[in-house]
């Protein structure tokens, strides 16, 4: 796999009909600078808005993957994305004068041929690979879908499909060498559907541009000639149609015996490209579909964002530690004697966090709370929770240095056991909900596995520029923020 980023040398265009919308589209691949990523540009709309190709902008997965920003939508991006990933293109602008790329023959080959014609240009910036270092799993029991990413030093995909349909049966395939196999073994594999789905898809507003030249239709039921004619008339198919004998409408020959499984692998590649960075992993997918692919891509992208944040603050890798005290000081403004979390040992971006506070007899509050009977003040236990939660909140948003976190309320605060010198406090915070900029978390504090305190917290995240509060303060309950922010628990 390549070490440096690359783009294409020159613009290249192709035109045709969109599979689902039926729009006639001209699409142009253009070179892009380093670290630009893949972006679709709608030149038919005012201002030529760009839509970044990532899962944060996915808005629909109905038989294809649609991305959008506002009114700028791009349908069925997965085959284009698979072509770019398969050819290891990191930076590219894709201009469209309509809302869907031309489908071509239903495979990724037309895009691959165009990109090969454009040629490639190596760039100076290194590729930002996401290296999977522990298994990541997705399971959907209702759909029978399982997808897992396993550690490896390159990019491999294995796919199994089984639709419990005798017309297709069970199929499997695998891509093990991107450079040697993608262009010839997978890019030419075409999209497919079952005969019984055709009318349903048409009624749902899909396959408006579909025909027997850009999709394989698998025959899964017997039809009489008059029924075939009725379906063709309804769908506007003027060519003659026969059920055929090879299991495919009109006896169209398959490029490979397991072409449907290979196309599913192509879809997985395209959807996982929306993670936004190249991947080093062994991906195993059983019965994948666009909805499952995108949910899995969301998990992987969140893992990538988490790794980015950890690298930003934690420069020295330490076993069992996500953020050490030096990293925490880069995130929080608190200093002695009010910094009440020593390290973060677990962190799932925008989901949960675990912090540790070592309570020693040297804590200044023990001098007066209480003389001869040192007990950690409950309000400081809650403050430790709040500081840990502040790291979770501010690292779950973009540009945390420009934000303020106000803790708006504490509910159901309970203190179960006293915390004494020599104890190790473990704070566990979980995100309950995040609506716009209002967040609700639950917090628990443990010593030796025993619950010593708990609370429910509500916080508001606002832009620093919109706040009239310029100094840190508080009523003894807590202050959280980054080193560039000031905020108070009220």
Image (cartoon, helix red, strand yellow):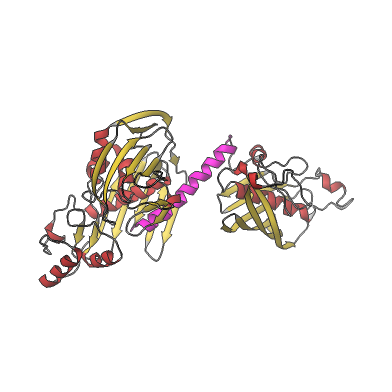
Query: Taking 87 as reference, is 452 above or below it?
Result: below
Residue lying at the far right in this picture: please name it.
Answer: 371
Residue lying at the far front in this picture: please name it.
Answer: 46
**Which residues, given as a range, are shown in magenta?**
287-316
- Among the 4 quarters of the image, the one containing residue 216: bottom left
Which secondary structure is most common in the magenta stretch?
helix
Q: Residue at x 20, y 64 (%)?
A: 235
Query: Taking 85 as reference, is 192 above or below it?
Result: below
- Among the 4 quarters of the image, the one containing residue 415: bottom right
- The verdict on residue 195 being magenta is no
Q: Residue at x 84, y 48 (%)?
A: 366
Left or right of 418 on screen, residue 128: left
- The verdict on residue 294 being magenta is yes
Left or right of 55 on screen, residue 398: right
- Among the 4 quarters of the image, the one containing residue 324: top right
Q: Quadrant of the C terminus?
A: bottom right
């Amino acid at each position: 796999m390549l070490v440096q980023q690359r783009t294409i040398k020159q613009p290249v265009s192709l035109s045709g009909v969109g599979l689902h919308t039926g729009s006639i589209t001209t699409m142009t691949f253009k070179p892009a600078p380093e670290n630009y990523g893949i972006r679709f540009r709608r030149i038919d709309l005012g201002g030529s808005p760009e839509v970044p190709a990532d899962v944060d902008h996915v808005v629909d997965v109905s038989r294809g993957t649609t991305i959008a920003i506002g009114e700028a939508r791009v349908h069925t991006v997965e085959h284009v994305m698979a072509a770019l990933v398969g050819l290891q293109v990191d930076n590219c602008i894709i201009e469209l004068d309509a809302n869907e790329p031309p489908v071509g023959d239903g495979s990724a080959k037309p895009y691959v041929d165009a990109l090969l014609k454009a040629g490639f240009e190596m760039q100076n910036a290194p590729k930002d690979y996401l290296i999977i270092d522990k298994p990541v799993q997705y399971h959907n029991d209702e759909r029978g879908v399982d997808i897992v990413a396993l550690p490896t030093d390159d990019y491999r995909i294995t796919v199994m499909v089984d639709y419990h349909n005798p017309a297709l049966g069970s199929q499997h395939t695998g891509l093990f060498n991107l450079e040697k196999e993608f262009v010839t073994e997978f890019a030419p594999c075409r999209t497919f559907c079952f005969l019984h789905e055709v009318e349903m898809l048409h009624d749902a507003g899909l396959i408006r541009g579909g025909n027997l030249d850009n999709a394989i239709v698998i025959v899964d039921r017997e039809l009489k000639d008059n029924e075939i004619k009725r379906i063709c008339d309804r769908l506007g198919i003027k060519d003659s149609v026969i059920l055929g004998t090879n299991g495919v409408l009109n006896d169209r020959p398959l490029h490979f015996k397991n072409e449907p499984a290979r196309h599913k692998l192509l879809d997985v590649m395209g959807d996982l490209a929306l993670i936004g960075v190249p991947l080093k992993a062994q991906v195993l997918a059983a019965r994948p579909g666009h909805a499952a692919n995108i949910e899995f891509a969301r998990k992987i992208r969140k893992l990538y964002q988490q790794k980015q944040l950890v690298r930003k603050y934690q420069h020295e890798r330490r076993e069992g530690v996500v953020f050490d005290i030096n990293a925490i000081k880069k995130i929080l403004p608190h200093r002695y004697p009010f910094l009440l979390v020593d390290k973060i040992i677990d962190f799932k971006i925008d989901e949960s966090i675990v912090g540790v506070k070592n309570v020693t007899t040297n804590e200044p509050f023990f001098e007066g709370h209480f003389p001869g009977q040192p007990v950690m003040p409950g309000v400081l236990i809650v403050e430790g929770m709040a500081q840990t939660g502040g790291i979770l909140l501010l690292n779950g948003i973009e540009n945390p240095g420009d934000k303020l976190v106000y803790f708006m309320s504490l509910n159901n605060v309970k203190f179960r056991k006293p915390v004494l010198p020599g104890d190790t406090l473990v704070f566990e915070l979980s995100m309950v909900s995040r609506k716009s900029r209002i967040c609700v978390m639950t917090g628990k504090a443990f010593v030796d596995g025993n619950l010593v305190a708990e609370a429910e917290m509500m916080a508001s995240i606002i832009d620093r520029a919109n706040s009239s509060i310029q100094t840190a303060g508080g009523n003894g309950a807590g202050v959280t923020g980054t080193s560039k922010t000031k905020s108070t628990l009220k």
